[in-house]
């Protein structure tokens, strides 16, 4: 049952180039499989019999997650067994409505199927292609814009030949980012004949040391300096898209290093097993998992100054509408500009390493043979930890074998941004870090969010006040209705009035009539008893005060202390209230006056 089809072209013979096409169907039970081949001569054998590893073509042509996008591309490498060369496959998959199929099989039951037209072309030994054509559409500006200073970290990691894994949900972007990275090494894209298998090593076996150099010829100069550095030879492989069915070759003990890509998230859970460096395109970060690699790929001050300058040139000319070219349509910040900057960096690195070897191998080098404008060891500007780790790699051994020891006589052994840290470096780095924060965008977004929240809060507060006010009005109305009902019930149950009420009494008169009448005589008796008690108390108090006042007014005798009592009886009598005969009529008169005033009241 065919649900999806893939058209894949592969080259059986790199020289001359003869492409092949194959149709890949997706069977609901067996998965993707090759349906038939196109372009095979009648007498040719089945390519799968000649190349057993080509059985993975269906999984490479139909990447994981291809059904989630309307169109996607996949790039992969294959080993051609008869010639022991690498060939490249390109798969283009597109969603097609099943109703539009000209030849629709009975097994097609879904509304959408995947059709792909795949074209594969080997870049090895192709002389009719111009260099700019090979780099077209690789997205080198996007690589620098997205990863900034980490782009140089990725290049240093690539030179150290670790296990590098690119992960992303979009297969096309995943593959293009890897090609953009290897394009930073001049001439490497045209010399990938050994990248499909870790068993291949034809480049190292056939390359020879250059006899001379023509400085006016760029190709001659690059060949003389040992470029391209062969990163994919014995023990290494390159697979822009690598399916899960190919993990066994990655875990093989003969595979020492690789650069591969995957869209399957299962590899993220086993990243410590399968990679030293993980580049996650979805999260835009570079995670160096290996400790030794993290220490070796560190950037020096000159490295950071150089990559910051390059990043600034790209960011200042960045255009979101067209990321492939500068918005000024000039040379600065273009992809050609970026590649030439990295070419200059690598030439300075190679020349500085040769000069370092010259300085360290001679016991006492002749001062006349030293370069007059170079002070000390210029290789330190590229960081000694990186150089020490690079000297242990396979590509360094091959490069050192095929290059001249006095390479520094042709290329100046000096870092492009040599020197200590300056104020301009700090300002440029701060400007880059501030630009990475995207403060303008965040403030704009924050202002919009705050304004929206304030408007929503104002609406909510207004609604809340309206609801509270409505509840208060409802409570008032309910209380008023209950009061009216109470008054109506009281009016109905009230007894008939015994006497007419005055005009204007209203409903309140009926309530007052039902209250008990006060007893006037009992109230008068209570008031009279209280007055008598108060009068007796005041009379006794006045008598005591008069007695004391009389004693205070008497003059004391000479030699007699009025505060010291003469006898004990005097002390005892001091606590009693006594009146003289003269005071008694006055007290009686005061009592009669008090009784008279009380009766009047």
Image: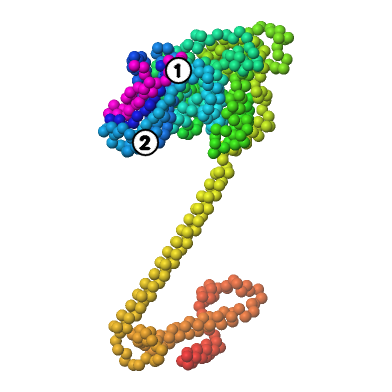
Give the SS element for disc 2: strand
Q: Which quadrant of the figure contains the N terminus?
A: top left
In this orientation, does residue 262 appear? no
Percent x, y for residue 267? 40, 27
Residue 16 figure quarter: top left
Looking at marks 2 and 1 on the same chain, the residue that comes earlier in the sequence is marked by 1
Q: CA distance from mark 2 to mark 1?
A: 31 Å
Q: Is residue 30 above or below residue 203?
A: below
Tell me the number on the disc at residue 209: none
Where 177 sits versus 200, above or below?
Answer: below
Q: Which mark is residue 17?
A: 1
Q: Is residue 179 left or right of residue 518?
A: right
Q: Which residue is mark 2?
A: 96
Residue 270 against residue 365 in the figure, above or below: below
Position of residue 403 measured from the top left corner of the image (x, y, whole percent): 59, 10
Residue at left offset 33%, top offset 85%: 514
Q: Say which element carries label 1.
A: loop
- Residue stretch in magenta: 13-42
Q: Residue visible at 58% across and 25% down?
A: 339
């Amino acid at each position: 049952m065919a649900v999806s089809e893939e058209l894949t072209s592969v080259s059986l013979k790199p020289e001359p180039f003869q492409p092949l096409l194959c149709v890949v169907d997706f069977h609901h039970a067996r998965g993707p499989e090759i349906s038939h081949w196109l372009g095979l001569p009648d007498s040719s054998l089945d390519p799968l019999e000649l190349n057993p590893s080509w059985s993975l073509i269906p999984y490479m042509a139909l990447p994981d997650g291809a059904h989630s996008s309307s169109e996607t591309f996949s790039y992969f490498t294959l080993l051609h067994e008869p010639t022991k060369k690498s060939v490249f496959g390109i798969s283009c998959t597109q969603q097609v409505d099943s109703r539009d199929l000209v030849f629709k099989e009975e097994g097609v039951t879904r509304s959408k199927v995947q059709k792909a037209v795949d074209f594969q072309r080997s870049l090895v030994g192709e002389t009719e292609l111009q260099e700019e054509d090979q780099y077209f559409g690789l997205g080198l500006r996007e690589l620098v814009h997205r990863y900034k200073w980490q782009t140089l970290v990725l290049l240093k990691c690539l030179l150290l030949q670790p296990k590098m894994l690119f992960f992303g949900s979009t297969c096309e972007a995943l593959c293009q980012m890897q090609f953009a990275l290897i394009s930073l090494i001049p001439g490497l894209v045209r010399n990938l004949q050994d990248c499909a298998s870790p068993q291949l090593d034809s480049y190292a076996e056939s390359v020879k040391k250059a006899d001379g150099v023509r400085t006016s010829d760029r190709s001659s100069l690059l060949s003389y300096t040992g470029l391209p550095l062969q990163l994919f030879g014995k023990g290494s492989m390159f697979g822009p898209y690598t399916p899960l069915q190919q993990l066994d070759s990655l875990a093989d003990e003969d595979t020492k290093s690789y650069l591969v890509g995957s869209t399957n998230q299962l590899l993220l859970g086993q990243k410590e097993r399968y990679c030293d460096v993980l580049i996650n395109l979805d999260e835009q970060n570079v995670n160096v998992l290996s400790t030794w690699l993290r220490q070796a790929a560190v950037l020096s001050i000159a490295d950071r100054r150089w990559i910051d300058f390059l990043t600034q040139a790209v960011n200042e000319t960045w255009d979101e509408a067209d990321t492939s070219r500068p918005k000024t349509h000039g040379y600065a910040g273009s992809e050609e500009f970026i590649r030439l900057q990295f070419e200059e960096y690598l030439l300075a690195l190679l020349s500085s390493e040769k000069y370092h070897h010259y300085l360290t191998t001679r016991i006492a080098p002749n001062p006349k043979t030293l370069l007059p404008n170079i002070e000390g060891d210029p290789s330190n500007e590229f960081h000694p930890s990186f150089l020490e780790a690079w000297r242990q790699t396979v590509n360094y051994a091959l490069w050192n074998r095929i290059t001249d020891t006095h390479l520094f006589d042709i290329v100046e052994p000096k870092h492009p941004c040599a020197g200590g840290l300056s104020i301009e470096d700090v300002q440029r780095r701060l400007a880059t870090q501030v630009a990475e924060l995207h403060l303008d965008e965040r403030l704009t977004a924050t202002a919009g969010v705050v304004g929206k929240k304030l408007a929503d809060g104002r609406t909510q507060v207004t609604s809340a006040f309206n609801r509270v006010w409505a509840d208060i009005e409802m409570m008032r109305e309910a209380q008023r209705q209950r009061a009216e009902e109470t008054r109506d019930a009281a009016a109905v149950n009230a007894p008939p009035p015994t006497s007419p009420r005055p005009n204007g009494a209203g409903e309140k008169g009926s309530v007052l009539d039902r209250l008990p009448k006060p007893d006037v005589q009992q109230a008068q008796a209570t008031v009279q008893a209280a007055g008598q008690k108060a009068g007796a108390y005041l009379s006794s108090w006045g008598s005591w005060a008069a007695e004391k006042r009389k004693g205070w007014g008497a003059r004391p005798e000479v030699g007699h202390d009025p505060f010291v009592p003469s006898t004990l009886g005097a002390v005892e009598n001091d606590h009693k209230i006594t009146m003289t005969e003269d005071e008694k009529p006055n007290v009686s008169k005061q009592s009669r006056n008090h009784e008279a005033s009380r009766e009047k009241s």
